[in-house]
Amino acid sequence: MKSRYSKWDNTQNPLDDEVDVAQVLEEMSEELLSGYGGRWSLRELHRRGMQGRSGLDSMLGRLRRARREWAERSNLSGPLQQVREELDNILGLERAELSGKEGDEAQLKRMQLDALPRHPAGALRELAKYDFSSDEAKERYDALLERLKQEVLDSYFKSLMGSMQSVTPEDVARMKDMMAELNEMIAARNRGDDVDFEGFMSRYGDMFPENPQNLDELLEILARRMAAMSRLMASLSPQQRAELQELAESVLSDLDLAWEMDQLSQSLRELMPNLPWDEVSPNMGDEEMPMSQAVDAIERVSEMEELEQTMSGDYSGATLEDIDEDQLRRALDEDAVQDLQWLKKIERALEEAGVVNRTKGRLELTARGARMIGERSLTRVLDRIRREPSHRARGGQAEPTGQTKPWVFGDSDPISVERTVYNSLLRSAQARPAVLRSGPGRVVKLSPDDFEVVETESRPRTATALLLDLSFSMPLRGHWVPAKRMALALHALIVGKYPQDSLYLIGFSDYARRMEASDLASVGWEDVHGTNMEHAFMLAGRVLAEDPRSIKQVIMVTDGEPTAHIDDGYALFNWPPIPETIEKTLRQAMRLARSNISINVFMLDTSPGLEEFMARLSSLTGGEIFRADSAEIGQTVIGSYLRERRKRAS
């Protein structure tokens, strides 16, 4: 094995996996052959993924579980509960200190404590004027106020607690200046004036560890945080909401920030109305947490809900590019991001390989793509044929004809070593003339185009018209996709192994029409009434009459008896079939037989009417009728084709 190395140019991704186009096409083939089109088939592949690669459905399942886990361990009433518990502890310390004291002052203080409001905000406000007797109670009260200031600010400005050890007057003044400038920037942009975002970040960038690159990014960060805070409020009971609102407002008013914060909140609501403002958050768990952590939890859940909506794609024009990779990384992990990036590469890889193209906004399979599906189908069919216990080579050992030909896909003839090596040397010499003067021991480098094979038989040239039933009953009974796989496999066999033969594809329902291999992977079944075998036989006779090959045959695959015929230029449908339809169909089949065109019919159903008709067809034309299971139709038809060729060659 050889390895090739190149200099790192900062564009390569050593972990980037190449897309196996053939495997991807095989994964899409079921939908493609069912007639759903390239866009639908690709979307279904995106949803289910492939072996070793998660699809969107799997990622969505993980995302929903992660969202539920976040919700289940978060208690939105925790901030109030924690404040209440700490207040109870503080008041307990103060009452214990007063319990051993007598006199008017102690009695007055006990009365003040008994008269405190029951809700935390009111109690904290009244305690600000209270003269504590217990030094420990006073210290814990001051610590609680300090922590609440940090909690409230961090609830609006994420990670602020991490950048402040305490909320000093200088910090508060700087915070107020920052919000005032931010509000002014929003107003200036609304007026159409220029804004100095770089100057703003040079002064206050340390408050925003997310490192926004422009004003829009900064406003989105703040809006998402404030929307999460509004969801926290909306998710509480009316009493809890009122208490927490009063607590937050009292802290902000005390810091002289309430007006600037309110103005900023209103501006962000107007700029980004699509965020989940004031929406009730899903049921949360029972783990108590500070206010900022509760907002963290809601913001995280809100982001997961937004990501879930985007990944679901339930809106017009949805694409994989809409999915934010950073959100996905935060919600799940790096593996999910890599799977998403791989899914995004699929369509581009298919187009670059030439197996699909975009025509008027539609993603369509090309002839090369259809050939690849056929080749993979053919490989499986031939493998099953070779494994059959009854499979034996006929006609004895093939003899060389003395001629060679270029190797093509499917060739099983012996390789001509002399011609192959000669072609390699000639190609190398044309590229580098000095190569022929090289000394002994030179390594011969072979290319697929160098190979030639020895012709081993005088092959008869055969023209085949494959008539494929396109009527509604084919998909209804599960025959549709297997029949199309068979047709593509037969096409791949003839193009690859027997290029001197010809194959004409004819589809028929109420009317018959010529088809190309690429049509098989795009056309759907036809929701029309009629199985017009007469027109199919008529069209087959015309195309085979123009073919110069000496051996001609018709292969028909159907699951029903004829129910339509041409009458005065139009298809006339009747069920059950009328005698005129039967007679006209048999008459066309007999014309084929008189032109020395053999007829082989593969029946995918065994209804009494179909069997009776096929018995008459065989009797009048000498054609062969085969009962076939749709799951084995490829093996049956291609095996029959190969046996007939060997029989004629022997």
Image: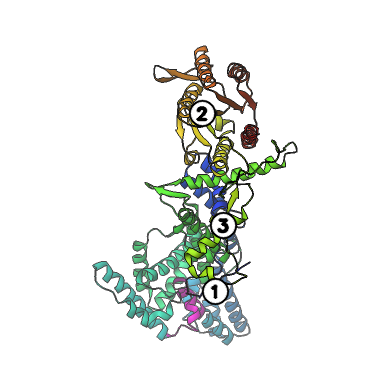
Which residue corresponds to mark 2?
A: 471
Q: Is residue 443 above or below residue 170?
A: above
- Extreme residue in the right direction: 389
Determine the secondary structure under disc 1.
helix
Estimate the x, y position of residue 438 in percent, counting from the top left.
56, 71
User: Alpha carbon of mark 2 to alpha carbon of mark 3: how far?
Assistant: 39 Å
Q: Which residue is mark 1?
A: 114
Q: Nearer the viewer, residue 7 or 64?
A: 7
Kindly report the secondary structure that dominates the magenta region of the rendered protein.
Answer: helix
Q: Earlier in the sequence, mark 1 or mark 2?
A: 1
Q: Is residue 199 left or right of residue 275?
A: left
Q: Earlier in the sequence, mark 2 or mark 3?
A: 3
Q: Is residue 13 visible from the viewing direction of this image?
A: no
Q: Image quadrant of residue 134? A: bottom right
Q: Position of residue 399 (x, y in %)?
A: 66, 42
Span colored in magenta:
146-168
Instruction: Give the x, y percent position of residue 453.
Output: 60, 50
| Residue 616 place in picture, x, y as percent | 60, 16
Give the position of the N terminus as an image quadrant.
Answer: bottom right
Nearest the viewer among 127 and 272 is: 272
Residue 59 tag number: 3
Q: Nearer the viewer, mark 1 or mark 3?
A: 3
